[in-house]
Image: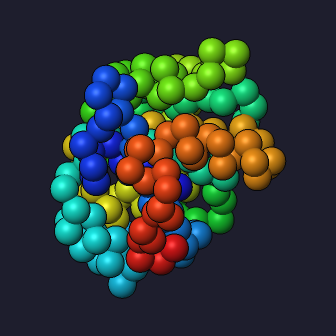
Amino acid sequence: MLLADGARAAPAAGRGAFARDAVEHRGQPGLRDHARRRPLDGQLLDWTQSLPKPKAVLIVSAHWEHAPRSLSAPAAHTPLVYDFAGFHPRYHRVRYDTPDASALARRVAAMMPHDEPVHQHPSRGLDHGAWLPLMAMFPLADIPVLQLSMPTHNTARLLELGTRLAPPCARKEPSSSAPGS
């Protein structure tokens, strides 16, 4: 799930929340076809360019299942996690140098219940479930990005997390779907 700050409605007074959309990275073929644009990459880029540019992006991905809730490293130029095998070594050198996301990390932590704090991983990078679609959607890597671990498989708890992160206007309506979702 992609949660983009500022991509839809203005944030609520004070804390604000995120517009949300589901984005699929289509697995490892994205790595094989990195040198040539795939049709889905073009669709994702066209879709994101049709929206206002987000101020920040938070990704909740099943590629990182970890309890308690955890956030990836917020520092600029966060490293990537190359959590795949069997591909040409060049794919282990791909970079996606995003700006500092410390403000986003503080905001996400403030949205969580006080009895369930968010663990900060100062060195955990973005895994391919995050950086593959980001490279297609925001190729300039000029938007702060964080990844939030999926803390449970409990559907009710995950829906509560999504509701907590959703903007007030999106809580009553289903989110729009991105290409490929």
Q: Is residue 26 left or right of residue 37?
A: right
Residue sitting farthest toward the right = 154
Q: Position of residue 5 (x, y in %)?
A: 32, 42
On the question of residue 56 being in view, the answer is yes
Q: Is residue 53 left or right of residue 95?
A: left
* 107 lies above or below 47: above
Q: How is the image coloured?
A: rainbow
Q: Is residue 79 left or right of residue 156?
A: left
On the question of residue 57 being in view, the answer is no
Q: Residue at x 29, y 38 (%)?
A: 11
* 47 lies above or below 175: below
Q: Quadrant of residue 149?
A: top right
- Choose between 175 and 94: the one closer to the eye: 175
Q: Position of residue 134 (x, y in %)?
A: 38, 56
Q: Residue at x 27, y 49 (%)?
A: 9
Q: Position of residue 102 (x, y in %)?
A: 37, 22
* 156 lies above or below 25: above
- Choose between 82 and 107: the one closer to the eye: 107
- Choose between 58 and 128: the one closer to the eye: 58
Q: Residue at x 35, y 58 (%)?
A: 135
Q: Residue at x 69, y 46 (%)?
A: 158
